[in-house]
Amino acid sequence: MQKHTIERSPADPATELRLELTRRIAAFVGLAENRATDIPGLTLHRRTGTTAPCSMTYQPSVTVIAQGRKRVDLGQTSFVYGPSQFLLTSVDLPVISRIVEATEQAPCLALSLKIEMPVVRELLSCEEIQKTAKSSDNPAMSAGEATADFLDACCRLVRLLETPQDIPFLGGLIQQEIIYRLLQSAEGARLRSIATLGEQSHRTAKAIAWIRANYAKPLRVEDLAEAAAMGISTLHHHFRVLTSMSPLQYQKQLRLQAARQRMVTDGLDAASAAFEVGYESASQFNREYSRFFGQPPMRDVRSLRSVGAPPLESLSAPQSV
């Protein structure tokens, strides 16, 4: 498995901004694990210990770690990122996520900001946006070092929570600045290409969005390629580049995650959950579920309930690409 681990120099000039971000996130999140804020798309996170691997789907977003360390597995690629680092996700991606460094004294503190593709396109239409080199072989997820300018914008965004009357006017402007900083970075090249009409990455993202919205329906790759205006082999290649998996593997992970959520939150039995997410064979569902989550469906659900597992991320409607 590939691993991308970024080490930050202790002499990084962004240290003071990172410490400020740590203090502000800690103050606003309190004792909660997750806190949605009055700023659209901004969520604050706190964990006081390491966590077991959790299967979920990341939407287009950027997560910034102020303190602690996190690991996210996308297919066979692993991203490990820590203080003053970020993880950029450019399309909906099923991943395995876990906290790998956190204590009661020094909890893992982070912010997540949802990325709206219309905002990305609006910024790309500005002549002032410098054209960076395009990347054709990186997945739609990347980890990078947060610059002082980037962290400064993040601090100002969180600081707005102290003056909620300023959020309607300044919130959107600061979010645009954060996205601008990402687009100017090497890690933003994939986001740029996905947002650009006519690019192969954009066409592939349309195929990803279709599966995301229709994961319970039968999938014919031929129809998917036609909808994306791409050849089958071309779609397979670019789909695997973006997601580190094939279209069928992507659909399978979405189905298994959705079934798990229905069993945990709605109390469905394994067979009912299997049929709801598109499986025609309960035995096939049991085999694939056991292989993916490590134990049979109902045993897994009982384990989650016994440890008081947090609610699983829901499968919400995909963003337009």
Image: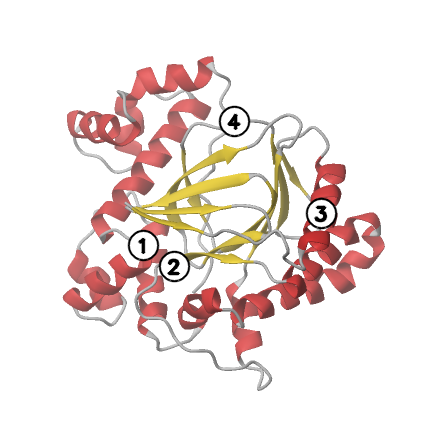
The residue to which callout 1 is attached is 243
Q: Secondary structure at mark 1?
A: helix
- Could you say where residue 165 lies in the image, as x and y percent from the top left? 84, 55
The residue to which callout 4 is attached is 310
Q: Amino acid at mark 3?
A: Leu
Question: What's the distance in space between the residues labelled 2 and 1, CA to CA?
Answer: 6 Å
Q: Amino acid at mark 4?
A: Pro
- Could you say where residue 209 lies in the image, as x and y percent from the top left? 37, 57
The residue to which callout 3 is attached is 19
The residue to which callout 2 is attached is 140
Q: Earlier in the sequence, mark 4 or mark 1?
A: 1
Q: Which of the image's four quarters has the N terminus? A: top left
Q: Secondary structure at mark 4?
A: loop
| Dots 2, 1 in contact, CB < 8 A | yes
User: Which residue occupies the foreground of this view, 318 or 6?
Assistant: 6
- Could you say where residue 7 lies in the image, as x and y percent from the top left? 50, 51
**Image depth: mark 1 or mark 3 in front:** 3
